[in-house]
Amino acid sequence: MHLSVKIIAGVAVAMAFSSSALAGDLYVENIHAPLRRVVPELERALTAHHFKVVMHLDVLKRIEAKEKVLHIPDLNQGKFTDVQAFVFCNPMFFSQLLNSHWKSAAVCPLDLTVFAKNGTTTIVYPERIAYTQKTPADTIANRIDSVVIAALKSIPGAV
């Protein structure tokens, strides 16, 4: 299987996993700046909050490049100019999840998606508490969400 097909398949799996959470469990940050200015600030904010970005995918461009092969009807009806995905990790949080409720460690690595349209960048983060409710990992997932959201709020222009 070609690398680009594997990446697209991986993104689809991540999206399916994320979609099992309730819509209310999505943290959204809108920044009135173009994506090209927000992305470096996002990476700095995650790093400052002790996360390591392990993957950065330009999802929309990759899918658009394979659109003829994939035969995706009505791709990008929302007319986004860019959609990018970030996968990031904090080994201490992973270890804490693994030790408290090993199945909850499946919420790692963490991810978020960045959408660009009309000069505005929207960051969507699926909160991990949606997956760990009623488990011993609840407290850790709440802490992870708090730190990620604090990172996103620290981006210049975040509301």
Image (spheres, rainbow, N blue to C red):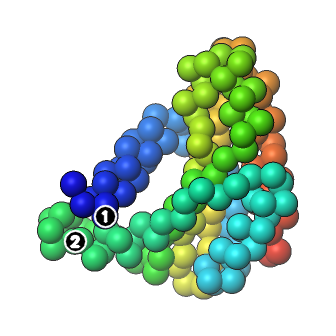
Q: Is residue 19 visible?
A: no
Q: Residue at x 79, y 24 (%)?
A: 139
The answer to whether residue 122 is above or below residue 9 is below
Question: Which numbered disc flags the more N-terminal residue, 2 or 1?
Answer: 1
Could you say which disc has been placed on residue 4 in the image? 1
Describe residue 27's horizontal placement relative to residue 154 as left or right.
left
Question: CA gap, disc 2 to disc 1?
Answer: 12 Å
**Crowdedness near tag 1: few (<14), some (14–19) or many (≥20) residues, C-alpha within 10 Å:** few
How far across and how far down the image is residue 132, in percent? 63, 24
Quadrant showing the N terminus: bottom left
Q: Residue at x 24, y 60 (%)?
A: 2
Q: Depth check: 97 or 22 in front? A: 97
Q: Is residue 64 visible?
A: yes
Describe residue 134's horizontal placement relative to residue 2 as left or right.
right
The answer to whether residue 101 is above or below residue 130 is above
Q: Residue at x 43, y 47 (%)?
A: 15
Q: Depth check: 141 or 87 in front? A: 87
The answer to whether residue 149 is above or below residue 43 is above
Q: Quadrant of residue 30?
A: bottom right
How far across and how far down the image is residue 31, in percent? 71, 73
How far across and how far down the image is residue 74, in percent? 24, 68
Could you say which disc has been placed on residue 67 in the image? 2
Q: Residue at x 69, y 26 (%)?
A: 97
